Amino acid sequence: MLSYQTWQKELERPIPYQSGAPFWTQPHIAREMLKTHLDPATDAASYKPDTIQAICAHLQTAMGWTAQTRLVDLGCGPGLYCRQIAALGVAVTGVDQSANSLRYARTQCRDQNANFLNASYLEPFGENTFDAALLISQDYGVLSGEQRQTLLGNIHPALKTGGRFALDFLSQQLGSINLDIHKRT
């Protein structure tokens, strides 16, 4: 049973772009977010299964993943991309703040070459470690300008020379989801 003070704290709205807001770790939100991620009828938290499969197939070709590729999936949630990418023989590391989603991801990827970190991608997550990085489900669009700079500042050193970074974004002009791939030089 929650005390009144704890309940009030849980109900406080975070300041927009507030660093360290407990959004992903709040138990009710974490449970509901996982349910939404796993709902095959909506693109609300994760894309629908067919879209995820198409994105993975496209990125495998576009980014040239092989069995030697080491990839980091930033904001991996329940590991829906990690599972498909690891099945291709790629070594995957998923990074997410939701321990609840990561528990699910670990069970789904138990027999694959997948590793998961309960952390924020706004904190450093590697140096010259990965051949590829993904930020899918339009996470970039919800970050403040400062957070975007921090994220990009973490991705660049985490990638090996020649490593590639793919992100998606929604374009009102184009009226669709767009994938963009960048290469570290």
Image (spheres, helix red, strand yellow):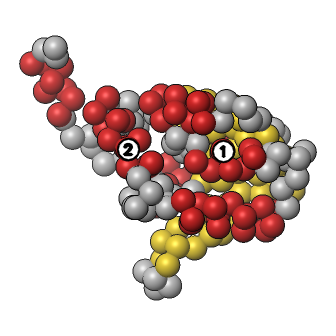
**What is the quadrant of the N terminus in the image?**
top left
Which badge, 2 or 1, is on the more N-terminal residue?
2
Residue extending furthest toward the left: 4
Please, what secondary structure does the residue beneath circle 1 have? helix
Q: Nearer the viewer, residue 53 or 176?
A: 53
Residue at 68% from the left image edge and 50% from the top image edge: 84
**Residue marked by disc 1:** 83
Q: Is residue 42 above or below residue 27?
A: below
Q: Classify residue 126 by image quadrant.
A: top right
Residue 47's disc number: none
User: Where is residue 19 drawn, in percent x and y?
Assistant: 40, 37
Give the amino acid type for the residue marked by disc 1 in the picture: Arg
- Neighbor class of circle 2 (other Cα within 10 Å; few <14, some 14-19, many 20+) is some
User: Where is residue 45 drawn, in percent x and y?
Assistant: 42, 54
Give the amino acid type for the residue marked by disc 2 in the picture: Lys
- Asked whether residue 72 appears in the rendered view, the answer is yes
Residue at 72% from the left image edge and 64% from the top image edge: 57
Q: Is residue 3 above or below residue 77?
A: above
**What is the quadrant of the C terminus in the image?**
bottom right
Q: Nearer the viewer, residue 39 or 174?
A: 39
Please, what secondary structure does the residue beneath circle 2 have? helix
User: Where is residue 182 drawn, in percent x and y?
Assistant: 73, 64
Q: Is residue 14 left or right of residue 106?
A: left
**Residue marked by disc 2:** 35
Q: Classify residue 121 by image quadrant.
A: top right
Q: Is residue 157 left or right of residue 1?
A: right
